[in-house]
Structure formats: C-alpha cells, structure tokens
Amino acid sequence: MKSARLYTIFWVAVLLGGVFSSCDHTPERKTTFAVVPKVDDASVALAKAAALAARERYDVAVRWDVSYRPTAASQAELIDKLVQAGVDGILLSCIDASDAELRGAIDAAVAAGVFVGTFDSDAPGSARSFYIGSDQTAAGELAAVTLRELCAEGGRAATGIGLFGGVEGDAAMAQRLAGFLPEVPDTAALLWSGDVPATGRKQATDFLTDEAQLPINGVVFLSGTTLAEANSIGGMARLDSLCRAATEAEEGAAAAAVFFDPTNDVLEFVHRMPHCAAIRQDYPVMVNGGIERLLRLVRGEGNGGGEVVYTPVEVIR
C-alpha cells in the first residue's frame, strides 16, 4: 500500500508539473533600446515623444535616459550603466565628441555587443554604427543666410553678431559654426553655456547689457537649451527690447535673431517679432530612423558601416 501511494503521488506531481509549466505566462523579453539626448527639456520634446511612441510602433522596449549632468563624463557613466543593464542598443546625442572618455564609453559598449547609433550630434571617430540627423554644417550656413536676410529687412548690416552655444566640444555646435562663420564672419562674441540654461541666459543678458554701446545687429542661439525653460525668453528683457520694433508706445531696436531647436515659447516670440526666425530639426524622423536602424542591426540585417543619414531642417518665421 505504501508503495502504491508513493506511485500515485509521483504521477500527480508529474501531471501538476505539466499543467503549471503549460500555464507559464512569463512575458518574452523585448528588444530594449535606450534613447540618450544631451538634455531633457522642451527643446527636445518632439524627440522624447517619438521615442516613447516607438514602443508600440516597433514592438520594442524604449527607455529615455538622460545623464545626471550635461557633461561628457556623466554621459559616459550613463552609457556604462546602460550596458550593464543589458540594453540591446543605444541611440545617443553625443554631448562632447572631443572627449576621449566619452568616445571610449561608446567603443566599450560596442565591444560588449551593444549597438550604438548617434542622432542630432555625432561622435565621429568612435565605433558608433551610424549617424542620423541634420547636416549641421548646412544648417549653420542656412542660419547665416537667414540672419543676413533678417538684417537686410531691418536696414542693418550682418555685423556685431552675438553667438551663444551649448557645449564647446559638441560636434553639432562645431559644425553649425563651420557653416555659419564663413557667411557671417563679423561677430562680437561667442559664448558657451555648457548646456546650463541659467548660465546661457546670464551670458546673453550680460552681453546685451555690457555691449549696449556697440551696434548689435543680431544674435544667434546655436543651442536651444538656453531658452528651453518655461517663460525663459519672456524673462529676458534685453533680448525683447533688442528684437522688438520701435513704435510710438515702445522703444525697440528691431534687430535680428535666429534660434536653433525652438520651444513653443520661442516660436511665439519669433512670430511676434519683426526680424526673427527659428531653425527647426526633424526630431521624429531622427528618432524613428535611428530605432529602425538599431532594430535592423539587432536582427542581423544591417552592416553597421558608419552610415550617415541627413534629415531635413526648416526655417520658421
């Protein structure tokens, strides 16, 4: 009898094991990508929306990860953590392509089997598989041509121009300058905020205050971060008076201004000022195209041969 009971218990256990194993609903792990911008503010809101929407569009897991500080060292640390977390691919907007530590983090990620592509700001010389984004040199030239037209509208020369950038080693900043300066060489200042909004706003305000005696005919914001916080552009009285048209009720200089990567607040400013324009990149095309390329690489369908894909930019008045 004892052996019979043991025999019965054995087969019950086998049957129950089969039932429970057939009911295992552990979800299959999805391919996981991390989208890593330089900053997380309103200037990249369209990129963030596209990244989060890609989860359903491509049936993948997508993370939106931003480094603790807008520095190359912090971004390199984030890349290391993403590799340890087991992501399959990283779509990176490189904050400082000149930094050896950051390039090393990209190379180490690729060596560990993680596919890396760049968008918006490239990391040339690294092991990244592709770059998808604006032709930043052409965008810089477009900004210069636009500024000259705006200055001409106001009867001004394109001289005494103030330039305000983000991180000096940012490849996008360098390429925009390379396109801009040959067309508009007479600049009064080139200042770098390090992608810290408060620093950028103070630099612009101090420049417009300290150089008020100069004929400042225009300003160009090479990085959208300076004016990305809510109401930041409205709080810069010096910029407002520089760009506002002169009327009987108000005193304005009607100077020219060009803004890269505008927020909605900046676009509203552009629409109401007489000689202002914005240069807008197509972030949704960049992000969707980047995730598509990472997905093909994961599936073994791409060669990762350093492909460069340019996406459109537009001038908004």
Image: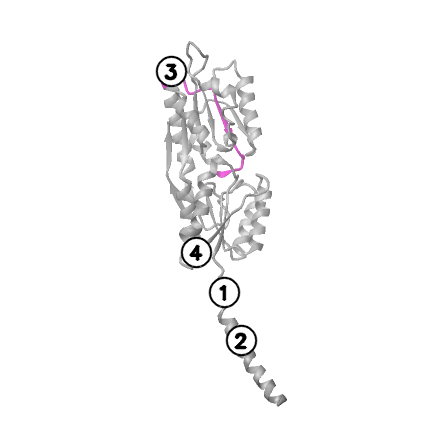
Q: How many angstroms separate mark 3 from mark 2 (CA)?
A: 87 Å
Q: Looking at the picture, which amino acid does disc 1 mark?
A: His
Whether residue 252 appears in magenta in the rendering, the answer is no
Give the labeled residue for mark 3: 155
Q: Residue at horizontal 52%, vertical 22%?
A: 236
Whether residue 167 appears in magenta in the rendering, the answer is yes
> If the image is split into quadrants, where does the N terminus sit?
bottom right
> If the image is split into quadrants, where does the C terminus sit?
top left
Between marks 2 and 4 in the image, the one whose residue lies nearer the viewer? 2
Q: Residue at horizontal 56%, vertical 54%?
A: 83
Q: How many angstroms separate mark 1 from mark 2 (CA)?
A: 16 Å
Question: Considering the numbered disc 3 on the image, is that residue within a helix, a strand or a loop?
Answer: loop
Between marks 3 and 2 in the image, the one whose residue lies nearer the viewer? 2
- Marks 4 and 3 in Cβ contact (< 8 Å): no
Give the labeled residue for mark 2: 16
Q: How many angstroms separate mark 4 from mark 1 (CA)?
A: 29 Å
Give the labeled residue for mark 1: 25
Task: Determine crowd level at label 2: few under 14, some 14-19, many 20+ residues with C-alpha closer than 10 A.
Answer: few
Between marks 1 and 2 in the image, the one whose residue lies nearer the viewer? 2
Q: Looking at the picture, which amino acid does disc 2 mark?
A: Leu
Question: Considering the numbered disc 2 on the image, is that residue within a helix, a strand or a loop?
Answer: helix
- Marks 3 and 2 in Cβ contact (< 8 Å): no
Give the labeled residue for mark 4: 297
Q: Earlier in the sequence, mark 1 or mark 3?
A: 1
Q: Looking at the picture, which amino acid does disc 3 mark?
A: Gly
Give residue 115's position: percent from left, percent from top: 48, 54
For the magenta stretch, what is the residue range? 153-171
Asked which quadrant contains residue 156, the reply is top left
Q: Nearer the viewer, residue 260 or 171?
A: 260
Q: Residue at horizontal 42%, vertical 41%?
A: 283
